[in-house]
Image (cartoon, rainbow, N blue to C red):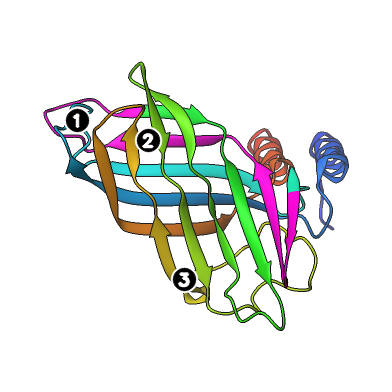
Amino acid sequence: MLHIPRRSLLVACLVFGLAAFLAPPADAVPIRYTFAATLSLASSSDSLDLDGATLTITVDADSSASPSSTISGTNNELSLYGVTATAVFSDRPNAASDETVVYTPNLMVTNHFPPSSGSDQFGIQSSFASFSSVTIFMPGISLAFVSSAFLPGTGPPALPLFDPSDVASVGAAQLHQQPTLPIYDLQNVSITAVPEPTTAVLLLMGMLGLAANRR
């Protein structure tokens, strides 16, 4: 007969109860969006030491989040989601150190539906941010899905999960200092969406591991 120590059983029950309390709805999926590109100087001198640097922007969001605002068009719906983004500038020239910028752009999702033939879209909007004590205009980066049928329904779209096979094209605006130069183009642009484990699941795994080690 299997013997389970009382202490371990109590810990497991406590953790499962806490996980059930903290867990999001079954249809909610935590998502980490990553926008990546290589910066290339387009004009002026490289006063920010960013020519050839790698830009990586991460945003943690939830598929069940409500949009900050919605805009209805002709055969399309746009949802905007206010988020906190973390941008890391790495591999900078002239031995410049990595720089991390936290700013608050919008994620944008556009749902096209018949008779529109436009592709559904997702991306991050351009926004101001502070970089090394100067103001810069962070670039908008967006993708077009393979068709107008990727996002379901005809209402305001939710934040999507997708993989590379769902993406038809990716584009980006320029990054530049405000209100003057320099200006940087974005090359080798990519956008990924990865489902993240929930806090409750991580807590459950950690606590059960602790209980097992103490047996």
In the image, what residue occupies the spot 62% across and 63% down? 161
Point out residue 70 in the picture as x, y percentages from the top left corner. Answer: 75, 52
Q: Residues within 10 Å of mark 2 (few under 14, many from 20)?
A: some
- What secondary structure is found at the residue carrying circle 2? strand
For marks 1 and 3 on the same chain, the one whose residue lies earlier in the sequence: 1
Residue 98 magenta:
yes
With 145 as the anchor, is 53 left or right in this view?
A: left
Residues drawn in magenta:
70-99
**Residue furthest toward the left?**
94
Point out residue 200 in the picture as x, y percentages from the top left corner. Answer: 74, 42
Q: CA distance from mark 1 to mark 3?
A: 31 Å
Image quarter of residue 16:
top right
Q: Nearer the viewer, residue 192 or 122?
A: 122
Q: Main secondary structure of the magenta part?
A: strand
- What secondary structure is found at the residue carrying circle 1? loop
Q: Nearer the viewer, residue 68 or 215?
A: 68
Q: Residues within 10 Å of mark 1 (few under 14, many from 20)?
A: some
Q: Quadrant of the C terminus?
A: top right
Residue under pointer 1: 49
With 181 as the anchor, is 15 left or right in this view?
A: right
For marks 1 and 2 on the same chain, the one whose residue lies earlier in the sequence: 1
Residue under pointer 2: 88
Q: Quadrant of the N terminus?
A: bottom right
Residue under pointer 3: 164
Q: Amino acid at mark 3?
A: Pro
